[in-house]
Image: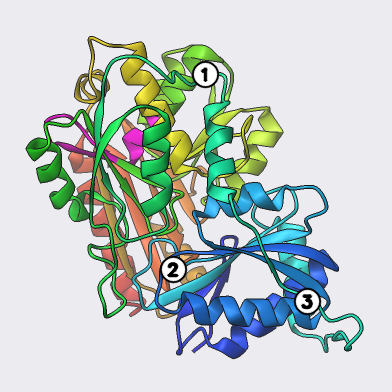
Amino acid sequence: MKPIISGSGIRGIFGASLTIADVVEFASAFGVLVGNGPVIVGRDTRRSGPAVEAAVTAGLMSVGCDPVLLGIVPTPTVQLEAMGEGIRGGIAITSSHNPGSWNALKLIGADGIFLRSRDRKRLITLLGRDIEYADYRTVGIPGKSSGSVERHIEGILSIPWLVPEGRPLKAVLDVTGGAAAAFAPMLMEKLGVEFAIINSEMTPEGDFPRMAEPTVESLADLSEAVIDENADIGFAFDPDGDRLAMVDENGRIIGEDYTVALAIDFILSVRPGPAVVNLSTSRLAEDAAAKHGCRLYRSPVGEVNVVEEMEKYGAITGGEGNGGVIDRAFHAGRDSGVAMACAISFLRENPDSSIGCWADSYPSYTMFKKKLPLGAGFDSLRTELIAQYGPADDTRDGLWYGRDGGWMHIRPSGTEPVVRFIAENRDNSYIEEDYRIFREAMESLCVE
């Protein structure tokens, strides 16, 4: 078994498709790519985290880099620290939404952005070469840095659109035992928001206390807690703290796509301009941008792809429908802290409203997501699907089709060995028919 390599980094099941030897190899290649000097290293709470951190440290030092260990911090904290003066880049040790058995390296450039295409290609080339290792005079020296989470929060508090004071609010934080367990409460305290915490720790066996991905299917506990605590909002995080899903004041799980739409809506109300989301993001984002007379553009899935499209069009805000909000004026990365700040600011700016009322002001869409094992390459499936559906409207990332009242997106995953079918529409019949064709195409190629 081999690790999965994509725009978000390198990931696999620890001890199987991602071994310590793999980690050392990738870390040393990354060190050669970025050059000698300090490299920021942070991790989430996975049981394999200390082992992978040790391997990353060894790999970096072996080529003359000086790893700077942050400990357990959210991925956006690593991105912000990687932008520091003289820092060569960063590695976030996390497999994001994957189960606790997985781990990964998210590779970050000195600009705080996941590796761009050119650097990813150079990294792959380095993996196939004999690397020149440091000797005893040039081997790297490890160090530690404290206060990174505090610096991250101070940065959020300095965002111009933030509303730091106002009506009393209470939130429930579902941190799924992950890296947001210290970060999220600290931010709430700074914003004067009362809070309760659920799912605070991982299990002794090394599993997350709920399904790691903050989706509608995994947030029943948060829904109940919001009602029990009489809270104004519920926040749910993924293990590395870059994504956020929301539950409204009535315990209704409104989900990740609403997180991004609310952020676009709120930020554009203060600072109008273009916005960017990926191809798999709900039309809610388009509705939010249109509300302020702004244009919304779409990019291939993946944070770095969204950021590069934002740079192209001069967009300040955007993100991904998985709950990843980006405010490029702060930093060019998905940040659950920015997403929380948007929601709290909205509630304080609109003291007579609520998250539920805001969500109900938008059209109602049906979103359907399915993933199936991809036993063969995507090219054969692509050919079959085009024969069935016709030419796609966008082919930058799999196949994307516009539909009357919605859209459909079929793409190979960059984080799992699966093909993803995602469709959204106000008319469910479009989705049912498109999915039927997709299943028949999969079955005809015997890839299930």
Q: Which residue is mark 1?
A: 161
Determine which quarter of the picture holds residue 404: top left
Q: Look at the picture and state if 170 lies above or below 53.
A: above
The reply to whether residue 117 is in sight is yes
Q: Which residue is mark 3?
A: 125
The reply to whether the magenta stretch includes residue 258 is yes
Task: Label 2, secondary structure: give it.
Answer: helix
**Residue 6: % across, % down:** 58, 66
Residues marked 2 and 3 touching at CB (< 8 Å): no
Task: Label 3, secondary structure: give it.
Answer: helix
Residue drawn at (37%, 34%) of the image = 189
Residue closest to the eye, 443 or 22:
22
Q: Look at the picture and state if 20 lies above or below 269.
A: below
Chain part drawn in magenta? 246-261
Which amino acid type is shown beneath numbered disc 1? Trp
**Side (left or right) of 292 relative to 344:** right
Q: Residues within 10 Å of mark 1 (few under 14, many from 20)?
A: some
**Residue 56: % across, % down:** 64, 77
Residue drawn at (76%, 85%) of the image = 128
Q: Which residue is mark 2?
A: 381
Residue 83: image tag = none
**Side (left or right) of 386 relative to 441:** right
Which amino acid type is shown beneath numbered disc 3? Thr
Give the CA separation, mark 1 to mark 2: 46 Å
* Front position among marks 1 and 2: 1
Residue closest to the eye, 202 or 292:
202
Task: Label 1, secondary structure: give it.
Answer: loop
Choose the circle earlier in sequence order: 1 or 2: 1
**Residue 429: % across, % down:** 18, 42
Residue drawn at (49%, 49%) of the image = 391
Q: Residues within 10 Å of mark 3 (few under 14, many from 20)?
A: few
The reply to whether the magenta stretch includes residue 27 is no
